Image: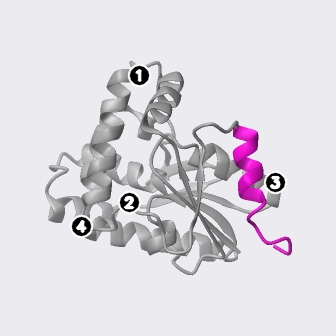
Amino acid sequence: MIVAVDGPSGTGKSTVSRAVARRRGLPHLDTGAFYRAATLAVLRSGVSPGDAQAASAVVAAAEMDQIEGRMYLDAEDVTEEIRSPEVTQTVSQVSAHPAVRELLVDHQRRWVERHGGRAVVEGRDIGSVVFPDATVKIYLDARPEVRAQRRALETGENPEEVLGDIRRRDEYDSTRSASPLTVPEGAVIVDTSDLSFDEVVESVLALLPADS
């Protein structure tokens, strides 16, 4: 069984997906971490993040894996480093390159294959591109102001600045030519704005088949 969890940042995708995977005994894959690791590789290489050909070559040469929730780049644990402001500000630019997305989609599909074809997979194009035939497709959403407040509580940043960043990221992700952020066909939309964490987890669990 593959559970595809999509949605913009700040909707609780990561924490909810991890909790659902744990409750159902399924592997969990954070595809956003792959894009962040790819961005870190590009930044370390010194090539321009906007240079599609150069950035894609760097990503193609990099070895990436996710093991028990930790992200590895060329056998180095970069779990914390990929959450740096520099990576956060650049990841949309790198992930917009079609060749980069193609490489990372292949990584993600092979990761799930290695884990028996069963996983809770979270991202922005899982149900639409990576696993369009997923058993269950879920799209988590929330009001931008709520998402900004959540992210500010996590990072200590100014909520107004975070809100501006979120709106810019939403616009960029939803209008890019390669795998734009969209509600996948057949997905169930769960608005998390006024729900507690436990309520969101239970809502998602209720959508999963019992025999997985």
Residue at 53% x, 26% y: name it.
154
Task: Give the Cα distance between marks 1 and 3.
Answer: 32 Å
Residue 178 is situated, as x and y percent measured from the top left of the image, at 28, 68
Q: Quadrant of the N terminus?
A: bottom right
Which of these two is toward me, 13 or 119?
13
Residue 181 image label = 2
Mark before the other along the chain sequence, 3 or 4: 3
Quadrant of image for the C terminus = bottom right
Q: Which of the two residues, 67 or 177, is positioned nearer the viewer here?
A: 177
Which is nearer the N-term, disc 3 or disc 2?
A: 3
Residue 4, quarter of picture: bottom right
Identify which amino acid the numbered label 4 is placed on: Ser
Name the kind of residue labelled 1 in the image: Pro
Earlier in the chain: of badge 1 and badge 3, it is 3
Is 169 magenta? The answer is no
Task: Report the side of 119 relative to 38 (left or right).
Answer: right
Q: Which mark is residue 205?
A: none
Alpha carbon separation for disc pair 3 and 4 = 36 Å
In the image, 84 versus 209, the foreground residue is 209
- The stretch of residues the image draws in magenta is 197-212
Provide residue 144's location: percent of width, then percent of height.
43, 37
Name the amino acid type tagged 2: Leu
Disc 3 marks a residue whose amino acid type is: Arg
- Marks 3/4 in contact by CB < 8 Å: the verdict is no
Residue for badge 3: 23
